[in-house]
């Protein structure tokens, strides 16, 4: 079985170790494995078992992450290994996130970077499962990617320690941080086996402090995690702590894994959540998993001119000046990086 010595762990008495990558800070006995299933203590040394064993590697439009204000139109090489530090009962990637055998194919960092460039991608996304749990693989790949002029993005549940963020920050250009159920602690305890949501908020503030481009998502789960009031509270927190220009994506839930008796989120509920987040003062709010909806688009916060038209993950019309301003009123639109035409797809239905 491949293994690679872990980063960020400490030796305790009796050959036990503490892993300090994610906020669980598992204490692992000799021979034991952490909660995520991919980090094992062997004689007082912690090893990553999934290093360079990719269970997924795909070329995706950056809009799929979703990142709407970072290198719009770019293509990214998306990689993942098995394992996760959450147990979300609704996970749509459960077949890999909850897998406990280390399955996948050898895909070392040098090959990931080479494949990224060969496929015409501008960056790499560490995604599908939680990148914190394959941190060493992500870190080595990210360092190499920067040397080749590629950017790196994490799609993460945000349950990272501040130490982990400090280490990856020089190489991490953007992060999508995913909330579920509006960040309700009870929802996290009951449906994801997460004892506290506080570390996610701390991680977000740390990313902001370290100048990592951040976009926040929230999965709106009918009946059990669709409180409009809570979504408004989360939006207010984002505005106060991350800034009013932070993109906020409200994602439609689809039944999956163990929560198949809950229906998809109604469009009207998503629209109410959108309105609440706008009322909380956020400039860029989006609906996700609703291809063709008008709230997939970017509108100028000042004059409401449609400046980026989308369908699903693709950009179908780009209506910004070369210096990323609204063509109608001249307001600067908060976008990091440049526009890449690789992600443009025609034709798509126009609403
Ligand atoms: S990364 Fe895994 S082993 Fe480390 S603290 Fe988190 S769940 Fe535990």
Image (tube, rainbow, N blue to C red):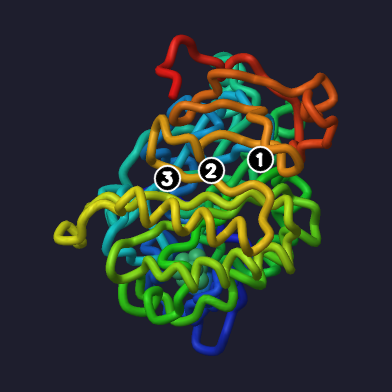
**Gap in Å between the C-alphas at discs 1 and 2?**
9 Å
Which element type, helix, strand or loop, lies under badge 3?
loop
Q: Residue furthest bottom?
A: 13
User: Please, is residue 319 above or below residue 134 in the view?
Assistant: above
Marks 1 and 2 close (CB-CB < 8 Å): yes
* Residue 112, image x, y percentages: 55, 29
Q: Is mark 3 within 8 Å of ligand 1?
A: no
Q: Quadrant of residue 99?
A: bottom left
User: Please, is residue 250 above or below residue 80 in the view?
Assistant: below
Marks 3 and 1 close (CB-CB < 8 Å): no
User: Please, is residue 22 above or below residue 288 in the view?
Assistant: below
Q: Which mark is residue 128?
A: 3
Residue that mark 2 sits on: 126
Q: Residue at x 62, y 61 (%)?
A: 279
Residue 175 appears in the figure = no
Q: Quadrant of residue 298?
A: top right
Which element type, helix, strand or loop, lies under badge 2?
strand
Q: Residue furthest left?
A: 261
Q: Nearer the viewer, residue 311 or 64?
A: 311
* Residue 331, image x, y percentages: 83, 36
Q: Residue at x 67, y 45 (%)?
A: 174
Residue that mark 1 sits on: 142
* Residue 342, image x, y percentages: 59, 15
Q: Residue at x 45, y 76 (%)?
A: 184
Q: Which mark is residue 215?
A: none
């Amino acid at each position: 079985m491949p293994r690679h010595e872990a980063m960020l762990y400490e030796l305790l008495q009796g050959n036990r170790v503490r892993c300090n990558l994610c906020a669980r800070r598992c204490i692992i006995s000799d021979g034991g494995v952490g909660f995520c299933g991919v980090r094992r203590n062997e004689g007082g040394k912690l090893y990553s078992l999934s290093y360079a064993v990719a269970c997924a590697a795909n070329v995706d439009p950056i809009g799929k992450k979703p990142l709407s204000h970072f290198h719009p139109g770019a293509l990214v090489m998306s990689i993942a290994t098995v394992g996760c530090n959450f147990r979300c009962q609704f996970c749509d990637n459960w077949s890999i996130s909850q897998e406990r055998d280390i399955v996948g194919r050898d895909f070392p960092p040098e090959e990931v970077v080479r494949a990224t460039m060969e496929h015409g991608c501008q960056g790499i996304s560490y995604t599908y499962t939680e990148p914190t749990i394959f941190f060493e693989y992500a870190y080595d790949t990210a360092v190499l990617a920067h040397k080749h002029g590629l950017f790196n993005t994490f799609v993460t549940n945000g349950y990272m320690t501040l130490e982990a963020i400090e280490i990856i920050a020089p190489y991490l250009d953007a992060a999508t941080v995913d909330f579920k159920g509006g960040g309700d602690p009870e929802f996290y305890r009951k449906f994801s086996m997460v004892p506290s949501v506080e570390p996610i908020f701390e991680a977000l503030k740390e990313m902001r402090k370290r100048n990592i481009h951040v976009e926040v998502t929230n999965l709106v789960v009918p009946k059990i995690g669709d409180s409009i009031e809570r979504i408004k509270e989360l939006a207010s927190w984002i505005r106060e702590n991350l800034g009013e220009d932070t993109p906020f994506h409200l994602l439609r839930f689809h039944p999956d894994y163990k929560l198949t008796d809950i229906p998809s989120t109604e469009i009207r509920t998503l629209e109410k959540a959108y309105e609440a987040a706008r009322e909380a003062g956020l400039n860029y709010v989006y609906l996700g998993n609703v291809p063709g909806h008008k709230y997939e688009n970017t509108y100028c916060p000042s004059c409401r001119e449609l400046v980026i038209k989308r369908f699903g993950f693709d950009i179908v019309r780009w209506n910004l000046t070369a210096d990323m301003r609204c063509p109608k009123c001249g307001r600067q639109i908060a976008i990091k990086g440049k526009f890449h035409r690789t992600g443009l797809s025609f034709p798509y239905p126009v609403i």
